[in-house]
Amino acid sequence: MKHEEYEKMSTEELFQEYREHPSEELKWEIVMRHTGAIRNIALQIQGVYSSFAQLDDIINEGLIVLARAVDKYDPSIGKFETYVAKRIRGMIIDLARQQDWVPRPVRRRAKEIERANSELYGELGRFPTDREIAERLNISEEEYQESMANSSVYSVVSLEEALEGCGDQISNRDRTSPDSSPDQIVERQELMETLAKAISTLRENEQIVLSLYYQKDMKMKDIAAVLGVSHARASQIHTRALQKLKVLLSGSI
């Protein structure tokens, strides 16, 4: 077939054609149709890599991820767009972890907040308030709020590391590849149920932020506009939600 004929086909039809008549030309036809997804996700979490990579670098890495995804994709697991979005986000997170990109002061304070949050949760039997955490750290609430805003992206990576306790990463990995064993599939389902239960205990604004950020791929500034709050406040809500999830999941993974 020619490029003009491919353009008339849906993504599903392209994959059907690729399964029946695989070729590099057809693979890259599918890849190039989804390059916009790479840019959108890269722009959404630009803070993760801005200190060590340019947008074009991330897009180039994303093209490789897309090409590999075309070969591994199984339509039975859902839409290709959802499948590749998880893999692209995972690629960016992996790059950030390899670069050890988080400034030491930010990382240190974020870890202190996480530890205080976990300790107070154990002592109080509930999530502590901002004031309680600030008092435990012997800092002002203003300093605490600023630290929460600064460590928003770090918390994404931190939650990933917590979820690796069961040998996987759930937020940014494809979890139902054709190569998955029955045990892995069951394990995934159990962890998904645990994560869903944990999310249901969060405050409404925290659930909204997570939904808009991870499911709708919205940028934090746009989420802030939806909520009618500042960019910094939206980042604080995001960080708080991730920290709560980490505490809740720590006893389950």
Image (cartoon, grey):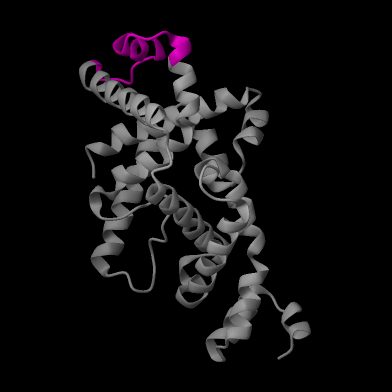
Along the horizontal axis of the image, is 72 left or right of 56?
Answer: left
Q: Is residue 132 magenta?
A: yes
Q: Looking at this rendering, what residue extends furthest in the right direction? A: 4
Range of magenta residues: 124-143
Along the horizontal axis of the image, is 2 left or right of 55?
Answer: right
Task: Give the quarter of the figure containing the N terminus.
Answer: bottom right
Image location of residue 237, percent across then percent down? 50, 26
Q: Is residue 187 visible?
A: yes
At 25% across and 55% down in the image, what residue appears? 167
Q: Is residue 75 visible?
A: no
At 62% across and 58% down in the image, what residue appears? 37
Along the horizontal axis of the image, is 90 left or right of 220?
Answer: left
Q: Is residue 69 magenta?
A: no
Instruction: Give above or below for 228 relative to 211.
Output: above
Image location of residue 244, percent across then percent down? 36, 30
At 44% across and 54% down in the image, what residue appears? 90
Image location of residue 63, percent across then percent down? 57, 67
Instruction: Give above or below for 53 relative to 235.
Output: below
At 57% across and 91% down in the image, what residue appears? 21
Image location of residue 58, percent across then percent down? 56, 56
Instruction: Give above or below for 189 relative to 220.
Output: below
Q: Nearer the viewer, residue 125 or 132?
A: 132
